[in-house]
Image: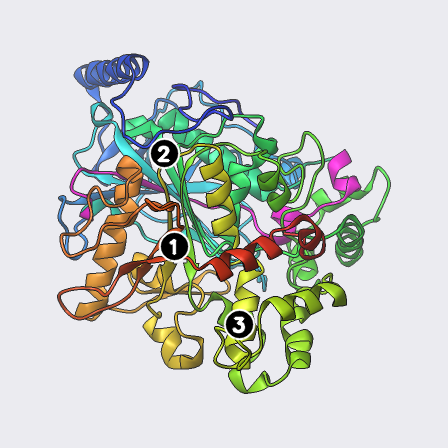
Amino acid sequence: MPSHVGPPHLVTSAGPIKSTPSRPSAKNMLYFFIVSTFIAASTAIGAKTSNLGPVVDLGYAAYAGNTTSPTGVDNGPVAFYGNIRYAQPPLGNLRFRAPAPLDETTTASQVLDARDWGPACIQRPATVGIGSEDCLTLNVWKPTNASAADALPVAVYIHGGGFYYGTPQGFPMYDWVAQHAGGIVAVSITYRLNLLGFIGGPVVAADGDLNTGLLDQRAGLEWVQRHISRFGGNPANVTIYGESAGGASVVMQIAAYGGTKPVPFRRATAQSIGFGPTNTEAQTDAFFASAAQFVGCPASGSEAMPCMRNASLGAIVSAINRIPNGAFAPVIEGPGGFLPDLPSRLIAAGKFTNVEFVGGHCTGDGKTFAGGRPDDFQTDDDIRRIVFSRWPGVSNATIDKALAIYPEPGALGSPFATEWDRASTMAGEIIFTCMDWFLAEKLTSNGVENIFSYSWNAPDTVLFNQAPYRGAVHTSDLYYLFDGTNTIANAGNTFTPFNTSEAVLSREAIAYWTSFTATGNPSADKESISPTWESFVGPDSSRRRLVLTRGNNTATNSTMESITEAKIQRCQFWMSADVVAETRV
């Protein structure tokens, strides 16, 4: 992994982050003065230009982007730079290894065309010709006139997709940059997926690296630290975002190395945190053996990894498609590794870095992952059979306890109107709708301020029309944050134009999200029609969250609510050490 280069991180593993945004330190002011002076001097000598579009010169490379004016633009046109390498191509001997640093000591002799996206990484289901191994690139959006002297806040997005599919192309950030009046810079990172990003086991550890997909993300964030100032961004004011597997990635980046190393970001937003159950060592070993067999390589010995690295892409693609979905995802490495233990255990033990935090989920996350339709759930046995098919490590004794904690409909004090309500709530709270609460609680107990919670209760219109019983289905927040996006496997994306009321909620959400990027307070630059997003801990020490809800053509119905004590108790159950040992989150 390349070491950190550039201004010092603001976040350390010791000491709380305070809530009031502060002026840049004298050291950072000096840094930006030096950077801006250098760029001004190079401009005077003769800065690189291109007929393709505006140029950003990083010294070792120069990129020409394109300029667009998104719909509803508030802050002037936005310049986009895509397909920017942040590491060497992970090919040949670099396959199954940590991302190798670029040679940034050279001087660019030409301007590279950066007007389009880089390739997606190999997806699942995999197809030769769709996606590429040579995919370690990122994308940057900035106000066209932004320069290093502006030191704008930076938002970095990590896409989801179960760690086996997805691409930044489904999450354009033009509107984030265009809408925020004070100006921000946005980045999205492409990282290796499935077998190429998360193959595990002792054979890989002995001649390669584990969790290379997570290491890719970290390498992209370190590139941001070194170079984002040239795009007008402030490397000391970076916020990372992600949803589902991207939300899990955010948590894993916070807990990386058990909190023993500083992180290259100041704030984090985790949406619908989704992963698990994390494979056991035995499962990881078995999946490696299967992959090696399908590729045509030995499953052990010194020749295993050289054979896997020399295998054709067609053989790798065949193995990806023949091994069960979910086989290749983040693995536990043990002491000294990027992921030394289960994220929930690291959080419980305080082995993570203090950062300002927003965490939340969609109200339909549990309905998405319950495993059935409303009519499928009539009895306790239906919940045992369907919901827990996703969690095979959960014992019958734990299921019995869960059923008691979630009173059946009609029982005294039960909040559940139907068995479907009961089952879907349980399916969501196992991880998707409780881990955000869990991390918010631990950050709060560490004295970190600027902690906020939310619940997204506005359905993705396209997905709602397909299955209304799921309500605000998993990924509904992404529909509003990214231009009506819906993503499909093999890097496919669709975008649905908003109607007026959808556009109102979209603007509200983007204002909250980018305000958190800029200041750590999602209400600092909120829309005038929007309610104040209050802190996670209320004045009476109750836990509070914002419920984002679609309204009419002029206002949303978003409002603050208290998190019930019953919900907190259920989350305490799922995040307890005994239960986590079975769910492996």
Instruction: Say which residue label 1 marks.
Output: 169
Calculate the distance from the C-alpha at mark 3 to the C-alpha at mark 2: 35 Å
Give the class, few, some or many, for how many residues have Cα within 10 Å of label 1's Cα (few <14, many ≥20).
Answer: many
Of marks 3 and 2, the one in the foreground: 3
At a point 50% along the width and 56% down the height, the residue shown is 568
Badge number at residue 424: 3
Nearer to us in this view, 520 or 59: 520
Q: Which residue extends farthest front?
A: 412
Instruction: Say which residue label 2 marks.
Output: 238
Q: Which residue extends farthest right?
A: 301
- Classify the position of the N terminus by image quarter: top right
Calculate the distance from the C-alpha at mark 3 to the C-alpha at mark 1: 31 Å
Calculate the distance from the C-alpha at mark 1 to the C-alpha at mark 2: 21 Å
Magenta extent: 179-206
Q: Quadrant of residue 574?
A: bottom right
Asked if the residues shown at circle 3 and circle 1 are in contact, with their CB atoms under 8 angstroms apart, the answer is no
Of marks 1 and 2, the one in the foreground: 2
At a point 72% along the width and 65% down the height, the residue shown is 392
Mark 1: which amino acid? Gln
Nearer to us in this view, 32 or 411: 411
Badge number at residue 120: none
Q: Quadrant of residue 283?
A: bottom right
Upstream in sequence: badge 1 or badge 2 = 1
Q: Is residue 44 above or below residue 92?
A: above
Q: Secondary structure at mark 2?
A: strand
Asked if the residues shown at circle 3 and circle 2 are in contact, with their CB atoms under 8 angstroms apart, the answer is no
Percent position of residue 186, x then y: 31, 41
Upstream in sequence: badge 3 or badge 2 = 2
Mark 2: which amino acid? Val
Q: How many marks?
A: 3
